[in-house]
Image (tube, rainbow, N blue to C red):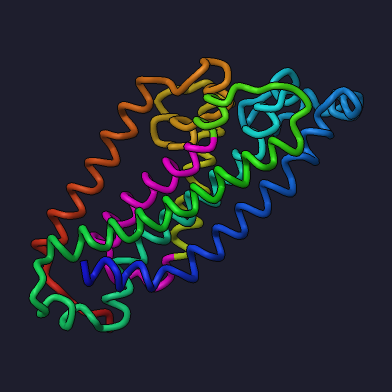
Amino acid sequence: MTIYKYELKQLRGSILIWSIALGVSIFAMLPVYMDMFTSSGLVAIEDFSENAFFELIGTNIEILTSSMGAYSFLTTFVLMASAINGMKLGLGSITKEYMNWTTDFLFTKPHSRSKIFISKLLASFTAILIISVVYFVASWAGMKVGATGGYDLRIFALIALSVLFMQLIFLAFGMLAGVLFPHIRTPIMISFGVAFVTYVLGSFSRKMNIAAVGYLSPYIYLDNVQTIINDGYRAGYMILFFVLVAIFIIAGHQIFCKKDVTPTA
């Protein structure tokens, strides 16, 4: 519990910044985009209805002109930010000990490596959970302000929940990557690169209609347009999602418990 509290305390600034940034952004932008995508702005939107960009993110004019469509459109960009944050949290939680030469101190205290890893994981999960709750509340407030008609609260919740899931899978992968490559000096750059590459793979999968490539991209697993079309998450992708999260966490934990400690020079 001591390690968990210490790690969570270290994350307070990050939690505050990400919560404010995502919360304020979605609350401010959601009413604007909903108004823009209604009939009053439909003529202007139709000029872009065949835009390749919409095809790359898997949406179309019919979906965009609904409340959930506008929300899913904005959340698409939030998912990339969420991926970066999750990866950075996971990667940084491991590599910082090597960068700051605190590995010997940490591992010689009366705590097992297993407890250290789990405490770091729980602290990071708490951080992404708080950020996701703030995003959910800000999204709900934005929907109250901007939505002109009714909307499906369940689909809204599933779309908002995708922000938590995106951070979770990248958090798990980031911790595994940090265990395997603990001497990374620039976790934020690596996080951005991984988030961007996986996004490109997802867009390529949509554009070329190659399903196999899509399995390499969490953006396909958490495709909010498909959530709207299918009236929920796609079971096959979500099963694979949780299997991958479990594999990343278990593998990271096992390697962390056995890996030799070599501080970064």
Q: Residue furthest top?
A: 230
Q: Is residue 77 a member of the stretch shown in magenta?
A: no
Q: Nearer the viewer, residue 68 or 265?
A: 68
211 relative position to 79: left or right: left
Residue 151 vertical placement versus 99 (above, below): above
Where residue 105 appears, x then y in whole percent? 17, 83
Above or below 35: residue 168:
below
Please tell me whether residue 182 is drawn above or below residue 83 in the rendered image.
below
Is 186 colored magenta in this rendering?
yes
**Image location (x, y in percent) of residue 209:** 52, 21
- In the picture provided, is 55 more to the left or to the right than 17? right
**Magenta span covers which residues?**
160-187
Picture residue at 13% right of the left edge, 75% below the top: 107
Q: What's the magenta bit mostly, secondary-structure-wise?
A: helix
In the image, 82: left or right of 127?
right
Identified at 25% across, 83% down, the residue is 101
